[in-house]
Amino acid sequence: MKFFVLGNNRELSVAEIEAVTGVHEFASREGDVLLLETDQTGPQLQDRLAGTIKVGSVVGELNKWDKEACADLIGAMIDPELPRVEFGVSVYDAGNAHRAKELRKESQRLGLEIKRRVKESGRPVRLVTSREKTLSAVVVATNKLLERGGEFVLVVTKESILIGQTEAVQDFEAWGKRDFGRPARDAQSGMLPPKLARMMVNLSGADPIHSTLLDPFCGSGTVLMEAILLGFTKVIGSDISEKAMEDTKANLDWLAAQGGAMPPIELSVSPAQTLVLSEPVDAIVTETYLGPALHGREHPDFLKRNLASLATLYRDAFGALANLVKPGSTAVVAFPVFQSKTGEQEVATRSMLESLGWKVERRLRYERAGQHVEREIFVMRRG
């Protein structure tokens, strides 16, 4: 059984795991982790997923807390050939938050017991701890725990305590480099975070090896970059803005310079409503134009005109885009949800999109504190 430590947007993280693994029945989906059966390896899964912090395997179970038995299990997992051992212990809630909190206090004593045993074998040993309630991916990676000893995880369910070992953690350096190291970033027009772009590409369910992906509002090319890294056969990007297309080209050139294979890429300056393709695509993944930047002090009349303008754009664009995908293909689209004094205001609606030939299968919210505009992710299929 695999455990997945989920990111901040839990619902999106679970949906992404479902799309990538094809598994929809879980041993547990409560608390901080997701538990499921899959044949895919931890490194394979972590390399593809953006909404998951850690992946590992469950190797044992305790019906009640027993420090000695737990130390026996973990000690057996530490490579006896390592000349020096560095390890850490984290505790996660999977449906029993109170018990997990208690075991976090016990985990320090558990770590010291394991350290004592390793030290008795004649090897130098270091127990890595953190002021946070669990070891972060950054702590695990920077201390190279997976190579030098391991991170061992206690997953506390309603029925028992599962003992696991982390197999892979999120590559925070690579994500940060693509987010902040790319040459073209335009905060004024809005920036789709690379992690969200990757989750959206995964939510399409398209098999990268045999698929062409289209982003008709490609902005600075974030979706295209993530699709390329996942191995899509071909990617197509278009945008009404010439500057956006220049930014996309700069970022894709930067990505190519990092090494790795680059598929055929088609780029064009075009409104989504009048885009023409030589053949239909397998998936559309995009963040639509969200409208002008907001500051939270806009007059209600301005917001009303903005909503009407965006509704017209979306109706025209997605009516036309429905003709550019193969029947049964999926579109994953981020639409804005505006926060105002009178409450939430949506632009895209299920009835609008289904009247254009799309079947809405799922809606997922992506939000961050302090934002005036949130994103509603629509997963929809062409009828």
Image (tube, helix red, strand yellow):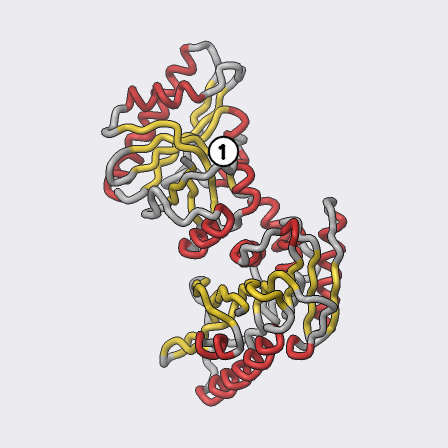
Residue that label 1 marks = 167
Left-right relation of 107 to 291: left
Residue placed most toward the observer, 168 or 331: 331
Q: Position of residue 282 (x, y in %)?
A: 62, 61
Q: Is residue 338 above or below residue 229?
A: below
Where is residue 243 shown, x and y percent of the image?
A: 72, 71
Tell me how many marks there are: 1
Q: Give x and y (percent) for residue 283.
A: 60, 62
Q: Is residue 229 visible?
A: no
Q: Nearer the viewer, residue 85 or 32?
A: 32
Q: Is residue 1 visible?
A: yes
In the image, what residue occupies the spot 71% across and 66% down? 279
* Tag 1 secondary structure: strand
- Judging depth in this view, the residue of 283 and 357 nearest the camera is 357
Q: Nearer the viewer, residue 194 or 233?
A: 233
Q: Which residue, as the protein is rendered here, is positioned at the far bottom?
A: 301
